[in-house]
Image (cartoon, rainbow, N blue to C red):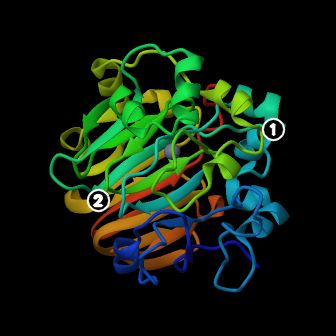
Amino acid sequence: MTATVIALPVNQFDHFYRGGDRIGALRHGPGGPSRPEEWIGSTTSRFGQAPQGYSVLPDGRLLVEVIDEDPVVWLGAEHVARFGSSTEVLVKLLDLGQRLPVHLHPNRAFSKTHLGLSHGKTEAWYVIDAPVGAEVGVGFKNAMTLDQVSSWVRERDSEALLSSLQTKVVHPGDAMLVPAGLPHTVADGVFVLELQEPTDLSILLEWQGFAVDGAKDGHLDLGFDIALQAVDLSAVTAADLDQLVLPAAQIQSAGLVSVLPAQADPYFRAQRIDTSGGPVGVTAGFSIVLVTEGQGVLVTNLGAFEVAHGDVVLVPFVAGYWKLEGSCVAVACRPPDANAPDGR
Ligand SMILES: [Zn+2]
C-alpha cells in the first residue's frame, strides 16, 4: 500500500478499569463501561499480549508492518537514521470512569538493564475534559525510602500511598509531562489525550478495588523487589509540578503551539493547531492528528482530506509540509525531532 493520509477507525478494548463512554462518543466507538483506553496509531502491543494494542488500518493490515516495510516514506530519512523504524510514540485516549491506581513506568536505563528494551515510558497528558477541581497526583511530596514504599505495596495501603503524593488540579486544555519513575494517579472523570514512549510497561503500587491481580501482573514479571527499583523516590514540590505543566491559557491561541515543556523534547512532541486565525502550516513528518473541535481540510502533497471533530488521521512524512484549513482545533502527536537530545 502506498503511504497516504489515513483516517483511523476506533481502537478501544477491554481493560481492568472503568470508563470509555466519552471515547465512544468522540470516536464513534463502542464506548464503555470497561474500555477506558483507545490506542491510536499504535505500533506498540500490550505487555505480553501481542497483537493486542496494534492499530489495524482500514485495509486490515497492521500499521507496524506497513511502516516496517517502508519506514522512510512514513517517518522520513532523518528520523529513520536516528530512530530506525520506530515511530517513537504511543498515543492514547484515556477516559477515566474511576481513579487510576497509583502506578509508575520505568525509565530507559531500568528498561535496558532489566527488560532488554530501549524505551522506558515517559508520558504526557493533554486534558480534553475534567470535572471541576479534579486532581492528579505525581511524585512523592517527601523523599521516600524503598523500604517504606515496599511496605505500602505489601500491606495494600492505598490510603498511605495516595496521601504521600504531590497533587495538582488540572483543567480542560492543560498539558502535563510525567517523567518516567514518578508514581502517579489521575482522578475519576478526567479525559486525556496521552502521549507515551512506545512501550506498555506499568508497575502497580496498589490494586485494591481494581479488576487486576497486581501481585501477578503489577511488576512486569520481575517481582516487586526488582520492579520497585524503578520508582523515583525523590521529593517533588508543587513548584516542580508547575514546571511540568503548560496551562490551558498559555496553550489556547490561534496558530501552532507546542503544548509540552522542553523536558518532553527527547521523547515526543504535541502541537495544538488552531485555525481561528487562518490556515496553519505544519512541517513534514509522521503525525497522529486528533481533531478536537470543528471541521476543516488537511491540505498535503498527497491531496486534500476533510476532517471533523473526533477524527484521527495519520499523516506520513511523504505528505510533506501540510496545512490545516477551515474552522477547527486539532492536536498533532509527533515523534521527537531527529536532532532531539537523548532521553533517559
Ligand atoms: Zn501512567
The amino acid type found where label 1 is placed reads Leu
Q: Measured from the top left, where is residue 320 in percent x and y?
A: 58, 59
Q: Horizontal and vertical percent for residue 145?
A: 54, 14
Q: Which residue, as the protein is rendered here, is positioned at the far front?
A: 155
In front: 14, or 316? 14
Please state if 192 lies on the left or on the right of 91 as rendered.
left
339 to 288, vertically: above or below: above
Q: Nearer the viewer, residue 223 or 337?
A: 223
Contact? badges 1 and 2 (CB < 8 Å): no
Q: x, y (%) of residue 221? A: 77, 45
Q: Does the beta carbon at disc 1 come under 8 Å from ligand 1?
A: no
**Mark 2, residue position:** 189
Q: Nearer the viewer, residue 38 or 227?
A: 227
Q: Position of residue 302 (x, y in %)?
A: 58, 73
Q: Is residue 343 visible to the viewer in this orientation of the structure?
A: no
Q: Is residue 52 left or right of residue 8?
A: right
Quadrant (top left/top right/bottom left/bottom right) for the N terminus: bottom right
Q: Please state which amino acid type lies under the numbered disc 2.
A: Gly
- Residue at 42% in and 76% down: 33
* SS of the residue under disc 2: loop
> Mark 1 packing: few (<14 Cα in 10 Å), some, or many (20+)?
some
Residue 60 vs 39, above or below: the answer is below
Q: Residue furthest left?
A: 132
Judged from the image, the secondary structure of the residue bearing numbered disc 1 is: helix
Label 1 vs label 2: CA separation? 33 Å
**Residue at position x 64%, y 46% in the image:** 218
At 46% from the left and 78% from the top, the residue drawn is 305
* Residue highlighted by disc 1: 115
